[in-house]
C-alpha cells in the first residue's frame, strides 16, 4: 500500500540549476577525456596513414602495429634472452616506485604520529622546517644528491632513484591533518586500557586515516612513475625507468613526427596509473575533501 502511494506521487521536476550543473559536469568530463581519446585513436591508426588537418578520427582500419614496433624499439617489457629474463623499463620502474612507497608508508605515519601525539621542545619549529622543504625547487638538490649517490656507490641502480624520496614533507603534513581528526576521547580510552604508543598508532590513529594513506599512495606512485629528471641524472643504462623509454620516441623527429609510436608508448606507460586511479578514486577524493587544516 505504501509503495503504491509513493509510486503515485508526482516526481519533483529537476531544477534549472541542477540541469546546468549536470551539463557543466558532462562538458568537463569530455574535455578531460579528449587527450586520452586522441592518444588511443592515433595509436590505432596505421603508420602510413598520416594525420592531416581535420583528420583526427580512426584511419581506414585499426592497427596494433605501433604497439609492436614500440615494444621492439624499447625494452618496456622483459623478454627471454639466453634462457633468462632481461631487465625492462617496467621492472625497473616497479622496483623503485614500490620501494619508495613501502618506506614512505613507514616513515610518514611515524613522523605524523610524533607531531600529533608527543610534546617535545622545538616541535613547532621542526614541523615548519619540514613544511619549508616543499618550497625548495627539486632541481637545486640535484648536484648534492648526485654526489651522495656516487659516494655511496649506488649509481645506475633503482635504489639510487628511490633514496631521496624515502621521507616526504607533503605526506607528513597530510597524515598529521588526518591524525588530528581522531577524537581525543578515543586516544585517552586507549591509554587508560594500557596501550603502548605503537598500539595507539596501529589500532587508534591509522584505521580512520586509511583513506588519506591511500590517497597519498596514489599521489606518490603517480609522481615517481612519471619522474624523469632525477632518474636521468643517476642512471645510464640498466636501471632506467619507463620515462626513459618514452624519451627515445621524442627523439625520432629526424624522420618526422612519429605520432602513432609516441601515443602507443604513452599509453603503455600511463595504463597502470589510470587503472589504479579508477580503482581507488573514491578514497582519493574523500581523503582530500575531508582533510581539514588544524
Image (cartoon, rainbow, N blue to C red):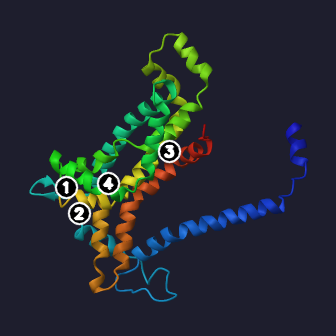
Name the residue tied to disc 1.
Answer: 87
Q: Residue at x 44, y 72 (%)?
A: 39
Q: Earlier in the sequence, mark 1 or mark 4?
A: 1
Rendered image: mark on residue 141: 4
Q: Is residue 196 above or below residue 291?
A: above
Q: Earlier in the sequence, mark 2 or mark 3?
A: 2
Q: CA distance from mark 1 to mark 4?
A: 29 Å
Tell me the crowding category of disc 4: few under 14, some 14 to 19, or many 20 or more residues within 10 angstroms, Cα based: few
The quadrant of the picture occupied by the N terminus is top right
Q: Earlier in the sequence, mark 4 or mark 3?
A: 4
Q: CA distance from mark 4 to mark 3?
A: 26 Å
Comparing labels 2 and 4, the label whose residue is closer to the camera? 4
Dot 1: element: loop
Q: How many numbered marks have been drawn onto this rendered protein structure? A: 4
Name the residue tied to disc 3.
Answer: 215
Tell me the crowding category of disc 3: few under 14, some 14 to 19, or many 20 or more residues within 10 angstroms, Cα based: many
Q: Earlier in the sequence, mark 1 or mark 3?
A: 1
Q: CA distance from mark 2 to mark 3?
A: 31 Å
Rendered image: mark on residue 18: none
Comparing labels 2 and 3, the label whose residue is closer to the camera? 3
The answer to whether any part of residue 77 appears in the image is no
Comparing labels 1 and 4, the label whose residue is closer to the camera? 4
Image-based side of 13 in relation to 55, left or right: right
Amino acid at each position: 500500500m505504501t509503495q503504491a502511494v509513493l509510486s503515485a506521487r508526482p516526481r519533483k521536476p529537476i531544477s534549472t540549476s541542477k540541469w546546468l550543473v549536470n551539463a557543466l559536469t558532462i562538458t568537463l568530463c569530455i574535455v578531460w577525456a579528449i587527450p586520452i581519446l586522441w592518444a588511443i585513436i592515433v595509436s590505432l591508426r596505421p603508420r602510413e596513414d598520416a594525420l592531416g588537418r581535420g583528420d583526427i578520427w580512426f584511419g581506414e582500419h585499426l592497427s596494433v602495429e605501433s604497439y609492436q614496433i614500440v615494444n621492439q624499439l624499447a625494452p618496456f617489457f622483459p623478454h627471454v634472452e639466453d634462457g633468462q629474463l632481461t631487465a625492462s623499463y617496467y621492472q625497473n620502474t616497479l622496483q623503485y616506485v614500490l620501494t619508495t612507497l613501502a618506506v614512505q608508508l613507514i616513515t610518514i605515519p611515524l613522523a605524523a604520529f610524533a607531531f600529533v601525539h608527543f610534546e617535545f621542545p622545538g616541535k613547532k619549529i621542526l614541523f615548519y622546517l619540514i613544511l619549508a622543504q616543499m618550497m625548495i625547487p627539486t632541481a637545486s638538490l640535484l648536484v648534492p644528491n648526485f654526489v651522495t649517490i656516487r659516494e655511496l656507490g649506488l649509481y645506475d641502480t633503482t635504489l639510487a632513484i628511490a633514496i631521496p624520496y624515502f621521507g616526504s614533507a607533503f605526506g607528513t603534513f597530510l597524515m598529521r591533518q588526518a591524525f588530528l581528526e581522531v577524537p581525543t576521547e578515543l586516544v585517552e580510552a586507549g591509554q587508560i586500557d594500557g596501550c603502548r604508543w605503537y598500539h595507539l598508532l596501529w589500532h587508534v590513529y591509522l584505521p580512520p586515516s586509511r583513506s588519506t594513506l591511500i590517497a597519498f599512495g596514489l599521489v606518490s606512485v603517480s609522481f615517481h612513475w612519471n619522474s624523469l629528471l632525477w632518474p636521468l641524472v643517476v642512471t645510464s643504462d640498466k636501471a632506467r625507468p619507463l620515462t626513459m623509454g618514452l624519451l627515445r620516441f621524442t627523439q625520432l623527429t629526424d624522420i618526422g613526427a612519429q605520432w602513432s609510436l609516441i601515443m602507443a608508448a604513452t599509453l603503455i606507460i600511463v595504463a597502470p596509473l589510470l587503472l589504479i586511479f579508477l580503482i581507488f578514486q573514491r578514497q582519493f577524493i574523500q581523503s582530500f575533501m575531508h582533510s581539514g587544516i588544524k
